[in-house]
Amino acid sequence: MKILRYLLQKEFIQIIRNKSMWPVIFVMPIVQMLILVNAATLELKKSDVLVIDQDMSDASRQLVNKLEGNPFFKVTRVNDADFDADDQLLKGKANVVLDIPQHFERDLRRDNKVSLQLRVDAINSMSAELTWSYMNSLIRDYNNNLRASWMGVSKFDPPQKIDVSSRYWYNPTLIYAFYMAPGVLVILVTLIGMFLSAVNLVREKEIGTMEQLNVTPIKKYQFIAAKMIPFLVIALVVLSFGLLIAKLVFNLPFHGNILVLYGFTTVFLLGTMGLGLFISVVSDTQQQVFFLSYFFLLIFILMSGLFTPVESMPKWAQLLDHLNPLYYMMKVIRNVVLKGSGFFDLKYEFFSMLGYGVVMFSLAVMRYRKTA
């Protein structure tokens, strides 16, 4: 323990003197929490709608007014039938084009039916699907009210046999920041734990202090542990700082036990730092560490479920995801923070991350060679 204590003292002094790490430790959490949580969203906040109204009747104006009253749509109205709507879609000036044909009101009154054309820019399939869903719901509601008005009843309301009342659990107001903020925190502690620990070790190779350590009677596991523990502490401090920002800025609720979250995070960091140290012991320069770390980080983050649900991935990708430590931690932090889940609710994730950490730490110790 005495040797480990001296090694830890040396590591903390080295981290404090290395000023290139300071922005990563102190600035990155603020920037990522304030920018990424707000920017990385799949919510539909605004859609440009171009309406070509060739009828100019009371019925068509009511439909356009209903669109304009919806906060999701920014409506531009055109009455020229020859207007090039496809060009507006092509240039990205409109996301949706709604064509209201001539004799829209007359045909609706006479034939009791009429057709509308809706063209949606589907480059972003999710946005297109949401836009189409909103528009379809709005037009259906407009149709019900219009028919009810013409039929002389207060509102077209078909009899319902089943009364369904819905309620959203764990995020009742559907605030997207509550979903993203825990995920961004996982990215933060991963970068601190995996990236900085890897860079710190390989830097000693470059400046030559590694050779001096190798001729001392320090055990391999003591050396690796001394490299991991300081960044474990820093990562937990960054996690606390990130939680504080999430609470103050986004009013993120915390329903779980904070000690459970720190326990799971410690186990998670054991695996990610083990992987970082394994990368550093097989690399000779910081550039090699950067490339290898980004390679793994990019795959881990994209497959973690941060942006898209894991359940929507192909079956082979879901099976491959069991090798991804971020997949487990993303589920853990969201369940602890938003649901208040405890250890026994997440024991599968705990033992999976623990097994991953033991394997990666063992690989790093075995691969590290004490040669002068």
Image (tube, rainbow, N blue to C red):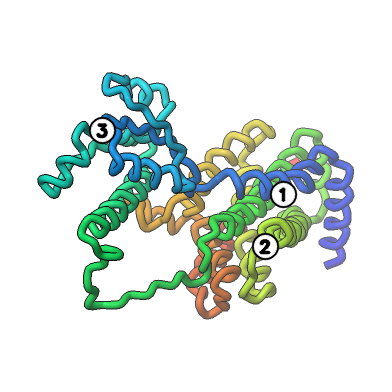
Residue 60 — which label? none
Q: Residues within 10 Å of mark 2 (few under 14, many from 20)?
A: few
Return the residue at label 1: 29
Q: In the image, residue 348 lies at what x, y percent?
A: 48, 72
Residue 251 — which label? 2
For mark 3, give the secondary structure: loop
Q: In the image, residue 62 lies at what x, y percent?
A: 34, 45
For mark 2, give the secondary structure: loop
Corner quadrant of residue 232: bottom right
Q: Residue at x 62, y 45 (%)?
A: 36
For mark 1, give the secondary structure: helix
Q: In the image, residue 26 lies at what x, y percent?
A: 79, 47
Of the numbered discs 2 and 3, the one sitting upstream in the chain is: 3
Q: Residue at x 54, y 56 (%)?
A: 176
Of the numbered discs 1 and 2, the one sitting upstream in the chain is: 1
Asked whether 102 or 220 is in front, the reply is 102
Q: CA distance from mark 2 to mark 3?
A: 48 Å
Question: Relative to 97, does residue 26 appear above or below in the rendering?
Answer: below
Question: Relative to 338, does residue 21 appear above or below in the rendering?
Answer: above
Quadrant where the N terminus is found in the figure: bottom right
Return the residue at label 3: 55
Corner quadrant of residue 260: bottom right
Quadrant where the C terminus is found in the figure: top right
Q: CA distance from mark 1 to mark 2?
A: 17 Å
